[in-house]
Amino acid sequence: MRDLFDRIIENKGPLGKWASQAEGYFVFPKLEGPISNRMKFQGKDVITWSINDYLGLANLPEIKKVDGDAAYEHGSAYPMGARMMSGHTDYHEQLERELAEFVHKEASYLLNFGYQGFMSVIDALVSKDDIIVYDVDCHACIIDGVRLHMGKRFTFKHNDPESLEKNLERATKMANETGGGILVISEGVFGMRGEQGILKEIVELKKKFKFRLLVDDAHGFGTLGKTGAGAGEEQGVQDGIDVYLATFAKSMAGIGAFVAADKEIIEYLKYNLRSQMFAKSLPMVYVKGALKRLDMLRTMPELKAKLWENVNALQNGLRERGFDLGTTSSCVTPVYLNGSIPEAMALVKDLRENYGIFCSIVVYPVIPKGLILLRLIPTATHTMEDIAETLDAFSSIRERLQNGTYKRLSAAVAAAMGE
């Protein structure tokens, strides 16, 4: 028998092994100053492409006033307790009504955090006799939610209708044996690649198979669709989404989330979501703040229009310069390059120190070995000057990657890590 912690000390995991080289700079970096298109990193001004403040709401004076007034009136604790016990208010109900109307559903229910809330929704919707079929590239919160499921689950290839259909055939056969049902899970927008989920194709399969569809639309809510109701509205299939999930942490620049569905389903979830029944209610400062943010989403379409002006300028500019953005169909802008993890570190350090560009870096095991993904998140606060500087910087760092500059710079790091 060994000590439980021996494994942890010996093997820190595929990302943890880089901690001594990466922490504080490449991971767990500290951006300072007001949330905006330009912030400070280690004392230097940088153009920030890593903030999910899509509509630029985070630092608006009218938003900060509502947040501040709510904090002054209620403090950060009110209401105390879980919703079922002592944490329920008229404002919570008002926000739920307005959210449901905004995403074209009968009812909605607030979640105190998106990650744990989404896990809990999956757990509540299925029993051991039910079968889950989900996109293999779904977000970690969905993967963890599926892990709670005591019944069978199948993955289908990312955004592959044929793979989904094959797995639905397997699931249908199994459900007929267990007497259970089928839950299909996808995302409105996949946060790494920026691709929209194949919601239209999934809904079309309802004509052939009996299942319910759950969609996590964290990146689509507020950014896609005529009114901003998300990927389902964008693709014309919002009615075909049975359970719709979105977070306040992206377009709403806040904390919290919600689930929306038919009234009967929401009534069931209210009494069966363990992460909400046994956890503190969403504090009033976030509830009133969300009401203000939602009102701005409804009444200020110019915010989304400016966002997409910037998205198109950035993505078109990168493509014109020959960069590979994959098949993104959202604001998420992934730039794929070939290189090792040490080269990625050297490249990103060059971007930040010498070009003043701060974007997220994604490497193995999140993506295959040999690939570097630089993920940019355009917002409504970015300017054409920001975009022009970024395009020039990316052209320069690609040239240095291709001529071996970063390979030479990273040799010491690679040797230390045994790469």
Image (tube, rainbow, N blue to C red):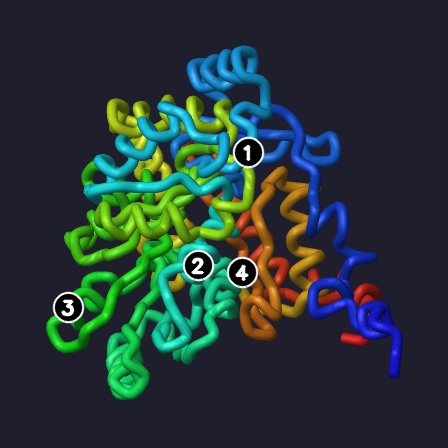
Q: Secondary structure at mark 2?
A: loop
Residue 311 as seen in the image, left or right of residue 370: left
Residue 222 in the image: state x and y as whole percent. Answer: 32, 38
Mark whose residue sits in front, 4 or 3: 3
Tell me what residue is drawn at x 43 percent, y 38 percent.
248
Q: Which residue is mark 4?
A: 373
Residue 378 in the image: state x and y as whole percent. Answer: 43, 40
Tell me what residue is drawn at x 50 percent, y 12 percent.
69
Residue 367 as seen in the image, left or right of residue 329: right
Q: Earlier in the sequence, mark 2 or mark 4?
A: 2
Which image quarter is the N terminus in? bottom right
Mark whose residue sits in front, 1 or 3: 1
Q: Earlier in the sequence, mark 1 or mark 3?
A: 1
- Indicate whether 283 appears above or below 12: above
The amino acid type, in three-letter code, at marker 2 is Phe
Cβ atoms at labels 4 and 3 below 8 Å apart:
no
The amino acid type, in three-letter code, at marker 3 is Glu
Q: Which residue is mark 1?
A: 81
Marking on residue 323: 2
Residue 198 in the image: state x and y as whole percent. Answer: 26, 64
The amino acid type, in three-letter code, at marker 1 is Gly
